[in-house]
Amino acid sequence: MKKLIIYTSFLFSFCQYLHSQSCTPQGNEVSYGSNDTWRGYVYDNQNFTNYKGYVNEGTAGNPNFDQSFGGDNVNYSTNGCTVQTETFSARYKLSKTFSNASYDFTVGGDDGFRLSLDGGATWVINRWNDQGYTTTTYTAALNGTYNLVLEYYENGGGNRLSFSVVTGCAGAENTAVYGNSNIWKGYVYDGINFDIYKGMIQQGSSGNINFDQNFGGSNVQYATSGCSVQTETFSVRYRLTKSFVNGSYLFIVGGDDGFRLSFDGGSTWAINRWYDQSYNTTSASVNLNGTYNIVLEFYESGGDNRLSLTMQAGIALNINLLSFTGRKETNAVVLDWNISPDSDPFNFDVERSADGNLFNSIQTIPGTSGTFAATNREYTFTDASPLTGRSFYRLKMTDLQGKISYSYIVAIQGAHAKPGELTLFPAIITSNIVYCKSGMKINKAIIRVTDMYGRLVHQQLIGKIERGQTVGIPAGANMLTKGLYLFTILDNDKQLITQRVILQ
């Protein structure tokens, strides 16, 4: 009897072996399904090796499916061989054409699953880990034909894989339209890069463009004209066309996370804090005159969310001169200067002098008052008929409010200094700088300033000055009262020149 049992067991195992040897997997493992019918390639392990055969999921016109593979730890049939539903995997492929719209993809699985829209190069859903049945949804704006790949593995216990795609909710407005009458049109998107348009909101009122918005709170559903958006990883682009009377305006914008403000339709940004941050505010003072297309953009990456904007009119701005330089060119002198973006220039009078004392206007350059600038504004002027000898230039600057200020003086040398000649200029200074033109080499230049009673009020070591070099020397004028002083240049203890200078 014992021999019979052993023989029967051997015969059963042998028959199973013969049967397994006769099993031939079907399918090429690379072809994509079509007509909304997936081609699924099944493997007898978790890493897509030991191929067993293929299955189909979905039907014509509907790619959605929910598959439990016949149950836990059973034989699951394919077009080829069966697979035991423990520690197995499946790779589904489908080539599908989508019309231009937003789509919601929902995938569920026990255990790991992931979905790709580009043939497996990237994964828009990726939960490649052991887990009980759970679902994940991804929304995408699609238009055209895509190679979908859906992968799944089962490690133990229950097994299930589900897939569905439906046309997503999307806004219908033209997102290029600007609000008016101080009421912003805000276009809301799912995704921090204005990815999927969901609908429109409005901010401001007929008499006030200011607002402070928290979008209903952190990680909640926020309603728009079309669809709700989850207030995590979303973005909003506000548009407003507004006319301004000629004047200066202060804009204060705050946000958590990124925000930026433009007055030229988004071409340049007057305020730009486009990065993750807790709530912070930034201000910009601008000159405006006329009608502007204002764009305010915001994104929320995670955690709290908030965006605020405040405008104040009638902010008086001065002219902030950043630099003023001059250079000699053939038969001409070229002057260059630039001012900060928030400056308020009405015009610039270029003034010239032969002695650094008496100046005359030689040209009026219009400013750019009432015009918004996102970067420093640069100006240039060429004096085509310069003086034959030494000349001095300065700018008389008039702002939009009529306030007048002067630049520092730029000295341009005509002929070279005579051998051994040392000159000190200008005779009247309004800043902290006097200029020294040397026809000799000075090894250890020292400037000494005394008042008219001979009392020393300032002394400073300048150092080496080369022959033919013109240097600007800090004269300590910012520490002195207005009046007449004696300026002396020494080389070590040797007096080279003493000259009277008037400090205005």
Image (cartoon, rainbow, N blue to C red):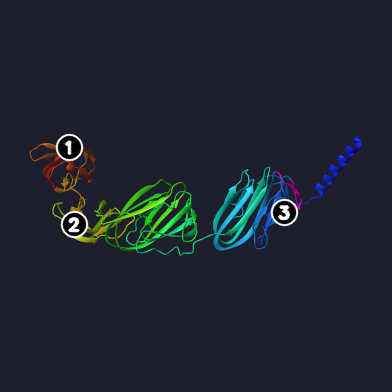
**Residue 236 disc label:** none
Magenta-drawn segment: 74-86
Q: Considering the image in quadrants, where does the N terminus appear?
A: top right
What residue is at 59 percent from the left and 59 percent from the top? 166
What is the three-letter code of the residue carrying label 3? Tyr
What residue is at 62 percent from the left and 56 percent from the top? 164
Residue situated furthest left in the rendering: 453
Q: Which residue is mark 3?
A: 54
Q: Which residue is mark 2?
A: 351
Q: Is residue 412 left or right of residue 292?
A: left
Q: Is label 3 in a helix, a strand or a loop?
A: strand
What is the three-letter code of the residue carrying label 2? Glu
Q: Is residue 444 visible?
A: no
What is the three-letter code of the residue carrying label 1? Gln
Q: CA distance from mark 3 to mark 2?
A: 88 Å
Give 10 or 452, whichever is nearer the viewer.
Answer: 10
Q: Which residue is mark 1?
A: 459
Mark sitting earlier along the chain (1/3): 3
**Nearer the camera: disc 1 or disc 3:** 3
Q: CA distance from mark 1 to mark 3?
A: 94 Å
Q: Is label 2 in a helix, a strand or a loop?
A: strand
